[in-house]
Amino acid sequence: MSMQPSLNQLISCQDDYDPNSMPVEQARKFIRNFLNPVSATETLPLKAARGRVLAASIVSPLNVPGHDNSAMDGFALHSRDLNTASLKIVGTAYAGKPFPGTVKAGECIRIMTGALVPEGTDTVIMQERTQVSGEIMTMLEPPAPQANVRYAGEDLKAGHAVLEKGRRLRPADIGLIASLGIGEVLVYRKLKVAFFSTGDELVSIGKPLGEGQIYDSNRYTLHSMLESLGVEVTDMGVVPDDPQALEQTLVQASAQADVILTSGGVSVGEADFMKQLLEKLGQVVFWKIAMKPGRPLAYGKVGEAHYFGLPGNPVSVMVTFYQFVRDALLCLMGQTPVPALPLLKATCTEPIRKLAGRTEFQRGILFADPAGVWQVRPTGNQGSGILRSMSEANCFIVLDDHVGNLPAGAEVQVQVMEGIL
């Protein structure tokens, strides 16, 4: 049985490891190397399996289609008769009600889409390319031999893997499995994620605000993003900046969850205290990621639970979740491979200010101009506390660490937010 390497072992293998300036891609790889997906499984009825990850490959028990059938409405005939202008119509085949006889030379039958291609035929001519007079069909434009026939096993062959283990099931996959007559699937159990916010200034919705206090939006943002991924969510509320309360909450969370997420408590001035607490309870490395927003980020383990300490600023929470936590959770859920977030190119309509040496994820609005060319414009104020910018945006403008200031009209990379979760 292979043992998962410790954080210290992983760090010792990386000569370029720098916790004070971790490049974005290196941080992703570092996290990925330490993840251990869930292994427990359960069997679910097909209708309850959307979004879950297959724990065993789906193998087709039959050919799809099961028989040679027509791809369209028309007339079934044998290719040897394609040079015969007119053929006698001797019957009709419907989907689910096949023609019972054999079609002879010089004959054809009417056939509907999905109907079995009868013995003595191997080609279908579409109805629009024929002319019918009584029982005689005349071909106006003969098709190629074997045209418009879907052959048995053309889509799926019996005994072949249809969907591989590790696939996260989409609606199309559910329909595909149903087409095989399979009503239950083996999936990995749901990943359990507990999360809470830290800070004396935070107040839960429904309570009055005191002087200097703000409502805690991060828990609602995180809850929504976690639900979109289909994990089992435990909201542990707001925890004050009290060592005993924080330790108690972390221990409680680690006892019931596979992953712990916190927001707040990892920025400069807070990190030393949190680091000591987390090192007491497990293993943790604090990164100052070379990115904006979301520079402070912690990853490690509390007991057996994976731990992500996210920044407290609302935009930073979302950016770090999208860029780091999303991939990690999908991996822990058993999905293989974890799909990369696609990068598209668009023309930026406004100049961009940026320092080289760090990756930035600016919020943008992607749109097509009247000529159909994709363009993007920043949402305006890019401050990490401007949650409205995330609500207005439909994409991230992704600016790599080597990129500096850009003029209007520059080509940039964008990540479309819709579909990230």
Image (spheres, rainbow, N blue to C red):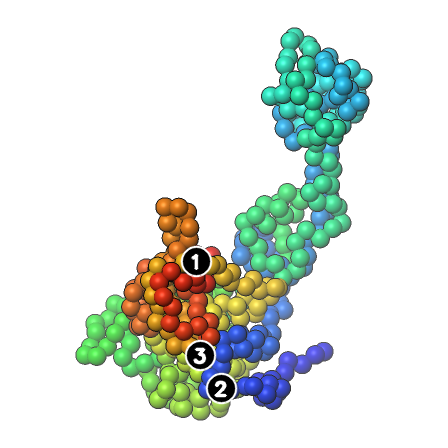
- Name the spot of residue 84 as percent of width and height, x first: 76, 16
Q: CA distance from mark 2 to mark 3?
A: 15 Å
Q: Residue furthest top?
A: 134
Neighbours of disc 3 within 10 Å: few (<14), some (14-19), many (20+) = some
First along the sequence among labels 1 and 2? 2
Any part of residue 421 in sight: no
Above or below, 88 against 190 in this view is above
- Name the spot of residue 101 as percent of width and height, x first: 77, 20
Residue under the image location 71 percent in, 53 percent down: 161
Query: Which residue is more in the foreground, 238 or 406?
Result: 406
Q: Which residue is mark 3?
A: 357
Above or below, 349 against 13 in this view is above
Which dot marks residue 264?
none
Amino acid carrying label 1: it is: Ala
Q: As drawn, is 339 to the left or to the right of 214?
A: right
Q: Nearer the viewer, mark 1 or mark 2?
A: 1
Q: Which residue is mark 2?
A: 19
Amino acid carrying label 3: it is: Gly
Amino acid carrying label 2: it is: Pro
Residue under the image location 43 percent in, 58 percent down: 346
Which dot marks residue 346?
1
Q: CA distance from mark 1 to mark 3?
A: 22 Å
First along the sequence among labels 2 and 3? 2
